[in-house]
Amino acid sequence: MSERSIIVLVEDDPNIADLVDLYLTNEGHRVYQATAGVRALEVCALRKPELVILDIGLAGEMDGFDVCRSLRADSNVPIIMLTARHDEIDRVVGFELGADDYVVKPFSPRELMGRVRAILRRSGTPVADNTQLMTIGSLQIDGQRCEVLLDGQPVSLAAQEWALLWFFAQNRGLALTRRQLLDGGWGSDWIGDIRTVDVHVRQLRRKLGDALPVKTVRGIGYRFD
Ligand code: CA
């Protein structure tokens, strides 16, 4: 488990930035701040963070969505997005761009720290049964390396997409509810809308295409065959 992690905090409100920085630093993390999108990308390239906390509403030419999209072009670093708006569209767009979690302002620093711990735990802990290598059609799922290959080529997945795929693969043939997928994939400390599962299944289908043997089970959820 990553006790001390490198975290890039992208927030243009200095009050929020300093408060969050203080809490993260108190937990032992090393925090690098950026207040604008372009700078955020530079800091991430330089520091190679283990987590990015990213405000959506940034002044300047890049907002948080743009930063998220740019980061995802070549990195699977976990991203927690912050927003001032309680807007479902923002949430869905954020997840589709590859954000791992989402916190609405005003939030309590404690709540945010809970999310940070959960994300770092998910991305840092080896999966329990991690020796397994599964081959399903043209897919190879490598539990040890947390990697999926499609026709021998690695496919880049966000941390949550990987966690969901792995949980599916370990429960082949079972119809799973969205709640089971949410708890099993991301842990019961995940606080989110169960529809989040749909967004991530859609992402997996987009990335893996017909090779992904996940079927929609009407009235229940999904099944991995
Ligand atoms: Ca802002």
Image: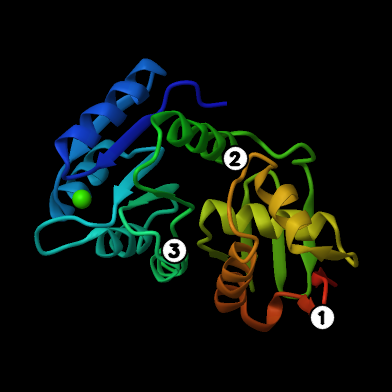
Residue 55, position in %: x, y?
Answer: 28, 50
Q: Is residue 35 above or below residue 37?
A: above
Q: Is residue 1 left or right of residue 184?
A: left
Residue 80, position in %: x, y?
Answer: 41, 47
Q: Which numbered disc flags the more N-terminal residue, 3 or 1?
A: 3
Q: Quadrant of residue 14?
A: top left
Which label sits on residue 122? 2
Could you tell me which secondary element the residue under label 3 belongs to? helix
Q: Residues within 10 Å of mark 2 (few under 14, many from 20)?
A: many
Please tell me which residue lies in front, 49 or 145.
49
Q: Which numbered disc flags the more N-terminal residue, 2 or 3?
A: 3
Residue extending furthest left?
60
**Is label 1's Cβ within 8 Å of ligand 1?**
no
Q: Is residue 85 left or right of residue 123?
A: left
**Is label 2's Cβ within 8 Å of ligand 1?**
no
Residue name at image x 62 percent, y 64 percent? 149
Residue 174, position in %: x, y?
Answer: 90, 64
Amino acid carrying mark 3 in the image: Arg
Residue name at image x 70 percent, y 75 percent? 212
